[in-house]
Image (cartoon, grey):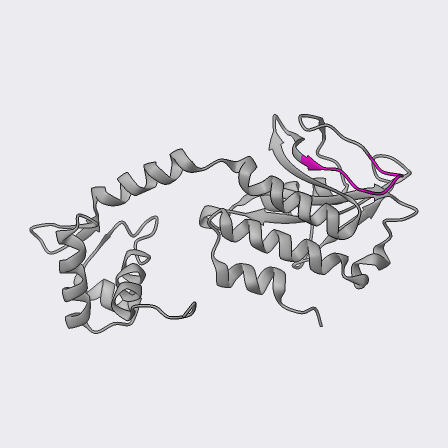
Amino acid sequence: MGNEGVNAVEKALALLDCFKPGEESLSLTELSQLSGYHKTTVYRLMNSLERMNYVIRHENGIYTLGPRLLYLGKLYEQSFHLASIVQPELHALAAATHESASWYVIENNQRLCLFRAESSEGLRETRLPGTSLPLDNSAIGQVLRHWGLNEPLFSETPRLPLYTAGVRDPHIAAFSLPVFGEGDRLVAALALTGPASRLTESRSQEGLAQHLCQTAFNLSVKLGARKTWCEHLFLTPLE
């Protein structure tokens, strides 16, 4: 039963997904073209959505999003606690890889460690949440610069996760990859850090990359990025 659904509900939600930045007002014809549904189907579904205040139909026949969506968005915003989403994933990642998992964001042109789950191994790199470091050439810095600041660091899409060792500290290595949110925009850099003697590039072939990519996928989807896009980016096997 987990995969069952109501076709009409899914179609109605797909019509709401047709509204995007730059396409806030859509006609019946445009909705039909964007969704691939017949005009008659679109008309009936939009009538239902209008009655429930999810869309507004103006006198010229143009549809816009309705106030009910704003209400639901505010409810979601009030219940949204980033730490409750990120920290469990970081702890699970640290437990699976035996390395320290971190969540970095751009703050005042530096990289800020916002959340952290420490490694269970004896030898580890310890960092307190709230620590700021330069946006350097480390794997974490590259993720934030390339996907967050749009710096053209790569001539083609790089293989994920990125890996560097000894950039900031000769004894520290890191794997990192981006986490996206609403509008598929960068939210943070997810990272695994540890001693360079243990956290080697070859470990990405030993399941470590799979754990990282799965965590980045989970977090990106939870934060609003497109699921199919994230599947292609994080879960498509490397050739």
Asked if residue 216 is positioned above or below residue 11 in the image, the reply reads above
Q: Name the residue located 89 percent from the left edge and 45 percent from the top edge.
A: 196
Using residue 1 as the reference point, say whether residue 8 is left or right of it: left
Q: Residue 158, percent across and down?
A: 69, 57
Using residue 130 as the reference point, say whether residue 45 is left or right of it: left
Q: Along the line of sight, which residue is nearer the eye, 57 or 50?
A: 50
Residue 217 visible, this angle: yes
Count of all numbered marks drawn on residues in the image? 0
Q: Residue 199, percent across and down?
A: 85, 49
Q: Residue 9, percent across and down?
A: 27, 63
Q: Quadrant of residue 211?
A: bottom right
Using residue 137 as the reference point, say whether residue 216 is left or right of it: left
Which quadrant holds the N terminus?
A: bottom left
Q: Name the residue located 83 percent from the left edge and 57 percent from the top edge.
A: 203
Residue 176 visible, this angle: no
Asked if residue 35 is positioned above or below residue 179 in the image, the reply reads below
Q: Name the residue located 52 percent from the left edge and 37 percent from the top edge.
A: 82
Q: Along the line of sight, which residue is nearer the eye, 71 or 239?
A: 71
Q: Name the residue located 85 percent from the left edge and 43 percent from the top edge.
A: 121
Q: Residue 65, percent across and down?
A: 23, 48
In the picture as drawn, the residue positioned furthest to the left comes out as 59
- Residue 121, magenta (yes or no): yes
Asked if residue 193 is positioned above or below residue 201 in the image, the reply reads above
Highlighted magenta segment, given as a residue range: 116-125
Magenta part, dominant SS: loop
Asked if residue 211 is positioned above or below residue 111 in the image, the reply reads below
In the picture as drawn, the residue positioned furthest to the right comes out as 197
In the picture as drawn, the residue positioned furthest to the front comes out as 1
